[in-house]
Amino acid sequence: MALSFTRQDTTTTPTAEIEKVLADPGFGVNFTDHMATATWSADQGWHDGALENYHPFDLDPGVAVFHYGQEIFEGLKAYRWSDGSIWVFRPEMNARRFQRSAQRMELPVLDEADFLASIDALITADAAWVPSADEMSLYVRPFLFASESFLGVRSSNVVQYAAIASPAAPYFEGGIGGVDIWVTTTYSRVGSGGTGAAKCGGNYAASLIAQNEGARHGCAQVLFTDAATHTWIEELGGMNFFVVTADDRLLTPPTSGTILEGITRDSILTLAPEIGLAPEEKPLTLDEVLAGIVDGEITEAFACGTAAVVTPIRSLRREVEGHDEDVVLTHSFGPKTAKIRQTLVDIQWGRTPDRHEWMRRIA
Ligand SMILES: *Cc1c(COP(=O)(O)O)cnc(C)c1O
């Protein structure tokens, strides 16, 4: 039976206070008035769908997520168009990925319709929190975690679903000028047969040490290579990786279990031919990419994901014989990267026809 996310109360922040937050929302620091919730248990299945005031969870210290990290999440954005209407971008892709992540982490699968209903209910209730300023959006974060209090190691018999929302400015401040990326060959994010294709908190926990290593070397983000050989480029901690060649090819490694199937990645591969780029999912070695940048065959590189959209890459930085070495791209924010970014955000903000029927109207 379908869950219903019925609004249970009507508390909302006064408009003036919302406006104050929306004037400078940051990323992921301010939360809206409501949250969608539902519970799953082994004996009752999914039940108790609700739309409640945003509130802390009351959790027993013994619940499994605190100990074994059985958890997944999603991230998508709601956009306010110039006519005031509110839209989300390809949310059914998030719903399906949430199901695949759940299967990998032995969590219960939430119906696509229930996932979409929870998001609709949340965004509708918190419509006043969807910013209208340029480049700003409402970031929606659905998540699912093991909430049974039990220290034995097995998949949890009780699971909590929730979706929360946070108004968002562009993720990287000044990121449009191009970021330096740290290439780690010390640490791995995931390995073959592991959880790389699942959007789970554990992957992020495992990436933080490399991210901090990168930060010590002045980099905002880390590029991971394959765990077995540190030869093949995979992706960043939370974004997929692309390069653009001088002869207009757009290359990204194939997602074969260790790379997250990004919705932004998929959208860019789909849009590429429309803007004169030949997309190719092709395994890329770190060496060939570095050499390609040096000899001018690769002219642009960028990272992509929902939070940061398209983040241009200025250089790849790594340690060579004890000191940092930068391999600098021809363009820190190249014309083709700019075109890809513009094409995508124009669809998201309704400034161009939505030929692929990617946008779903919420309000
Ligand atoms: C979420 C995520 C991405 C980007 O996916 P989008 O669907 O484009 O937001 C890329 N890599 C990792 C590891 C992620 O968790």
Image (tube, helix red, strand yellow):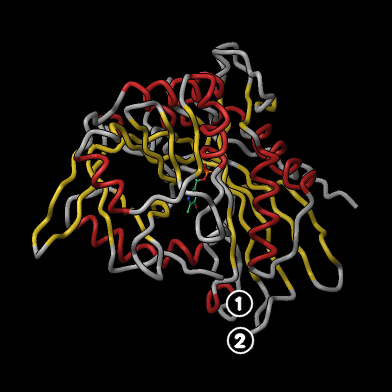
Residue sticking out furthest to the bottom: 152
- Label 2 is placed on what type of residue? Leu
Residue at the spot of label 1: 64
Q: CA distance from mark 1 to mark 2?
A: 6 Å
Q: Is residue 194 above or below residue 248?
A: below
* Residue occupying the far right of the picture: 1
- The crowding category of the residue bearing disc 2, from other C-alpha atoms within 10 Å (few below 14, some 14 to 19, many at least 20), is some
Name the residue rendered at 26%, 48% in the picture. Answer: 181
Instruction: Determine whether label 1 and label 2 are within 8 Å by CB.
Output: yes
Residue at horizontal 37 percent and vertical 31 percent from the top = 24
Q: Position of residue 313 (x, y in %)?
A: 29, 38
N-terminal label among 1 and 2: 1
Residue located at (41% from left, 52% from top):
235
Mark drawn on residue 227: none
Please tell me in which quadrant of the rendered image residue 329 appears. Answer: top left
Residue 223 coordinates in the image, percent (x, y): 33, 53
Left of 354 or right of it: where is 77? left
Question: Against 252, is 279 above or below?
Answer: above
Q: Establish if 122 lies above or below 154.
A: above
Reading the image, the residue beneath label 2 is 151
Say which of 297 and 255 sits in front.
Answer: 297
Q: Nearer the viewer, residue 170 or 246?
A: 246
SS category of the residue bearing label 2: loop
Residue 13 position (above or below residue 159): above
- Position of the C terminus by quadrant: top right
Check disc 1 and report its element: helix, strand or loop. loop
| x, y percent for residue 158 | 73, 72
Going by the numbered disc 1, the residue's amino acid type is Ala
